[in-house]
Amino acid sequence: MKRVVVLLIAALCFSLSPVFAGTVGMMEIQELKPLLGSENVVILDVRTGRDWSTSEFKIPGAIRASSSEFETWGNQFPKDKKIVLYCA
Amino acid sequence: MAWPYVIAASLSVGWTLSPDVLVRLGNGIAENRTLFLAALGFSALMSALAVSLIRHPELRNNGKCSQVGLLVQGIGRVPAMTLILVSRISLVLLIPTGLLVSAGFAFNEIFLYWFPNFGFAFIVLGVITLLHLAGQQYARMIQPVFAGIVLLSLLILCLAGIGGPASSKPISVDIGFSFTGPVLTGALLLFLGFDYITPKNAYESRLPAFAALLPCLFLFLFWAMLSLQYVPADKLASTTVPHMLAAREILGEPGRFIMGAAIISGVSGAVNALFHLVIDSLDGLARRHLLPGHPARGLHRRVFVSVFAIVIGVFMMAGLAGHEELESYIQASLLLWLLLVGMQCLAAGRILKQLDNSRAWQGFALGLVYICSALYLTAAHGQAAIIIRFSLIALVATAIASTLWLWKKPAYELTHTNHEKSGGNS
């Protein structure tokens, strides 16, 4: 019984973890539109596979970046610019 | 009386009218221009020859009216079991996983922004599964509707394109030759599915396949040329949605809606046809006691349909469609299908030779072309290692399982005496 309770608490903590995670700013399409083409904004299209290939909507100038290479992003993209991730 | 023909024809074009084929078509014409049109014609001709051979009247008795019978008698039980199981099961699990996601995105991006794409993909999968669970006849009857919507949509767009501005001032005027071996050979993959033999061959079974093949070829030729006229060639070659670009350029927003309907119907038709194709193939194996673990009688269709639907659902939930590897697995399953058609041609050639039929050489020649093409496309693919590894593991594992099954539960195939080998019209 004790083990079940521990497991339940662990599952609850795990499911709530995103709530306590660091906040990531969200951006509406209308907010991004005027920034398109700006030198201070880097748009990363992080969709992969068919999520990307079958989509009709691809932001002009967006760079495809794989989340599996997240560690290398620091060296790849300028830190002084606004980085926008497009995932859906 | 014509309805069975229509159903058989629409099942044959299930894969050919899918959005994946439209992508290959758009990219192919942009990369190879006029030469690609010739490749389309050649591939359609190859498919027609293969169909006429696999469904040769003299094979009806000797091949026992089915793909399984043809392969078992032509190449032996273990190779037949292995090839059928691997090619069919990989097809039904992998291609729908990719296609359904395409339908989901089309619905979300074209019709309803707020509707989740995965939700729609699951709805399509659920509807097709329910149709099969309700009864095979319902799943068959809906197929002409799916194929009809795709054909009608493409026809409307073609007619609009012919009368449009780019027909007099084409955007891509360079229609010269450009040779890309894998793309040209890959045109063979566009016309797969015509080897599907409807279970009840009470009528001339070649006719529906021919009737479906010719309109598809002409429509593809028109669509390919129009795409090139309306969309710049470099853009058409590099895009992942050439059919959407062409539809948008031809008819604007209504063109997107029409193409959206074609994509969703094409996906539904392809998934439905693949379910039929696989279930019928497995049923053929089960009836001969050649399906490992299954008793020697008709297939538990509902159980298998449910299992396939669950596995596809799990693949989608696990995000397989978001992995680049899925495209390699899909290519592998298509190449295994190509290999299967090649082996069917070889088997047909071998049986026809035993019957002293003059068309036996065609079987060997076609078989050779299909098998060599499958091997060439494998070697030329960017992810050849993944394709080879996947195919080899699946083939070896299935061959071992098939051998063990036959060793444990021997099944005996009746062979025809010389007197019976005269063929027949049953």
Image: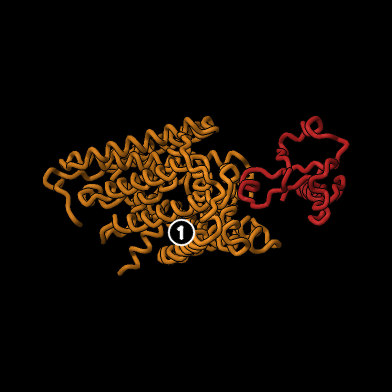
Chain colours: A red, B orange
Q: Nearer the viewer, residue B19 or B67?
A: B19
Q: Evaluate whether residue B272 shows in this view.
A: yes
Residue B375, percent from left and from top = 42, 32
Asked where in the image residue B213 lies, by quadrant, the reply is: bottom left
In the visual, does A66 lie left or right of B249? right
Kind of element beneath mark 1: helix
Q: Residue furthest bottom?
A: B1
Front residue of B200 and B179: B179
Residue B2: horizontal and vertical position, in percent? 32, 68
Q: Chain of mark 1?
A: B
Picture coordinates of residue B163, whole percent (x, y)? 51, 62
Quarter holding residue B209: bottom left
Q: Quadrant of the C terminus of chain B?
A: bottom left
Which residue reaches farthest front? B168
Type of the residue with mark 1: Arg
Query: Which of the image's four quarters has the N terminus of chain B?
Result: bottom left
Is B91 on the left or on the right of B299, as rendered? right
Instruction: Residue under label 1, please give it.
Output: B302
Q: Residue at x 49, y 59 (%)?
A: B162
Rendered residue at 56%/41% (across/down):
B327
Q: Residues within 10 Å of mark 1 (few under 14, many from 20)?
A: some
Out of B388 and B15, give the one closest to the viewer.
Answer: B15
Q: Position of residue B233 (x, y in %)?
A: 56, 44
* Number of residue marks: 1
Q: Quadrant of residue B141?
A: bottom left
Q: Is residue B375 left or right of residue A77?
A: left
